[in-house]
Image (tube, rainbow, N blue to C red):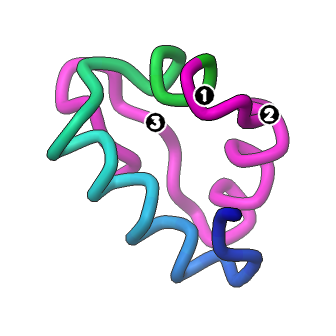
Amino acid sequence: MIPKDPVMLLSYINTQLRDFYPSFQGLCEEKGLNAEEIQTKLSGIDYIYDVDRNQFV
């Protein structure tokens, strides 16, 4: 289960990307996550996915 709080979600997703996954899409596919839902939640706190950095910034 992933965190519901956007700030905790940001930390969780960026840690997963840094430590285990080369892409956000790969993370979502492997864990069965809804990419659009996560992006919407994180955009609500002004974070977007940066492909080159492989993290939400």
Q: Amino acid at mark 1?
A: Cys
Q: Is residue 11 above or below residue 20?
A: below
Q: Which mark is residue 16?
A: none
Q: Secondary structure at mark 1?
A: helix
Inter-mark Cα distance, 1 to 2: 6 Å
Q: Residue at x 35, y 31 (%)?
A: 50
| Residue ID for mark 2 | 34
Image side of residue 45 versus residue 22, left or right? right
On screen, residue 13 above or below 31? below
Query: Looking at the image, is mark 1 or mark 3 earlier in the sequence?
Result: 1
Q: Looking at the rendering, which quadrant does residue 54 occupy?
A: top left
- The span picked out in magenta is 30-57
Disc 3: which residue? 49
9 vs 51, nearest the viewer: 9
Which comes sooner in the sequence, label 1 or label 2? 1
Front of the two marks 1 and 3: 1
Task: Give the secondary structure at mark 3.
Answer: strand
